[in-house]
Amino acid sequence: MTTAKTIYYFISFLKQSLMSNFFTLCLAVLSFPASLMAQTYALKADVVHTAAGPSISNGLILVKEGKIEWVGPVKEKTIPKGYKIYSAKVITPGLIDGHSVVGLAGALNQPHDQDQLETSGSALAPELSALDAYNPREVLVEYLRMMGVTTIHTGHGPGALISGQTLVAKTAGSNVQEAVIDAAAMLAITLGAGINSGFKTPGTRSKAIALLRQELLKAQTYLRKMEQAELSKRPERDLRMEALAQLLRGEMKALITVDRAHDIQAAIRLAKEFNLKLVLDSVSEAYLVIDEIKSSGAEVILHPTMKRAAGESENLTFETAKILNEADIPFSLQSGFEGYVPKTRVVLFEAGVAAAYGLPFEKALAAITIHPARILGLDQRIGSLEAGKDADVVLFDGDPFEYTTHVCIVFVNGKVVSENCR
């Protein structure tokens, strides 16, 4: 073989090798998990409501690798090269639904997609974990995400004396491992006449409190025995007692759904007796016992502003949010539970109505952002637009509480999950 032919074949081999490696590299890049690739965005708006302080005119948010990198006026920061720019009229933190059953209760409203309330056995079921029933692909989760709701506190709903545990999840994620950020947030308890529709016992309010007290006393005994040093003296595992022990240790909060004033007072007494971290849910007649709620130190997740005034909630008022705010009681708003299709509300609209009935704008926004984040113990991660927090951000084409305004772009964990104005 001549020297020229040798050089020719060597160059051909080299070119083929380089091309092969190039395509291998391209395939590797394309198959690289999107969640691990750096994503950088610059979000600009006429007004940025941070929920952490005063609103920012002509504001800018820099997002990098799922977190908020910087927040402030546009004039104070040069957008780094390579950041994709989005613009809007208004930007807010991702919205947080303070209490829901979405993900357990589905859009079809049929038995096979209604897992929020177990009625086949006892009205006392603290061992039920919402994690075992939560469906992150439920169409209602997608719907809330498109409407700017980036985090939901959901799980077993009202209707049983203890219906089970709740969880906190982002509205993005194809499986529970990706979506859920707190698998056991609270224990859902109901007091009042609402229990009687699904169970034969308890039949009266006093029986309900007696049953709760009895179970909590059992849990105290179980907890003392489990804390003994000798393994041989510890009782066998009991899922019901374990859940109640978590409640007694303060690892889960007691989410007590009540509406009547005397039921609210009963919940406060029970929480004080067992030193429970109390979150009062719904509280239609809260305005009648404001002083008791405030002195108890309880947090409140108020019923949906536009909830029907019927049954236990017949005495509700549109002004409860305003009254709680004026009393300096920490509260958030919620979508709650609906017994009909589509079984959810959008907390953005509930906050808008609360603002229309006297709740200041910033407080109304806080009731669906930073306030629920604090009640859920997640305010170091979500609820406001601050450097280091999860990049859960919503871009609007106008005032968020105006009926004609649209949610245009939604970020969850720094990723665009919706970008069609709705």
Image: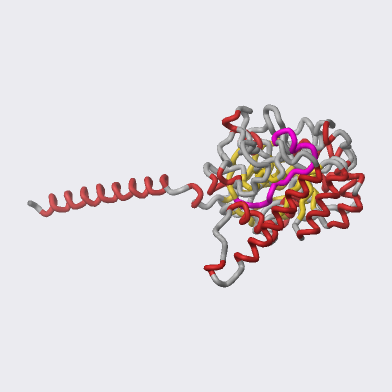
Query: Is residue 228 visible from the viewing direction of this image?
Result: yes
> Residue visible at 68% across and 27% down?
341
- The scheme the figure's colours follow is secondary structure
Q: Position of residue 178 (x, y in %)?
A: 54, 48
> Residue visible at 68% across and 53% down?
382
Q: Nearer the viewer, residue 229 or 380?
A: 229
What residue occupies the far left of the structure in this picture?
1
Seen in the picture, residue 236 relative to 315 is either above or below; the reply is: below
> Residue visible at 60% across and 65% down?
226
> What segment carries the magenta color?
181-199
> Residue visible at 59% across and 32% down?
113
Seen in the picture, residue 337 relative to 387 is either above or below; the reply is: above
Q: Position of residue 114 (x, y in %)?
A: 62, 33
Q: Nearer the viewer, residue 166 or 77?
A: 166
Q: Position of residue 117 (x, y in %)?
A: 65, 38
Q: Nearer the viewer, residue 60 or 149?
A: 149
User: Is 90 displayed left or right of 237 in the figure?
Assistant: right
Q: Position of residue 260 (x, y in %)?
A: 85, 41
Image quadrant where one finds the C terminus: top right
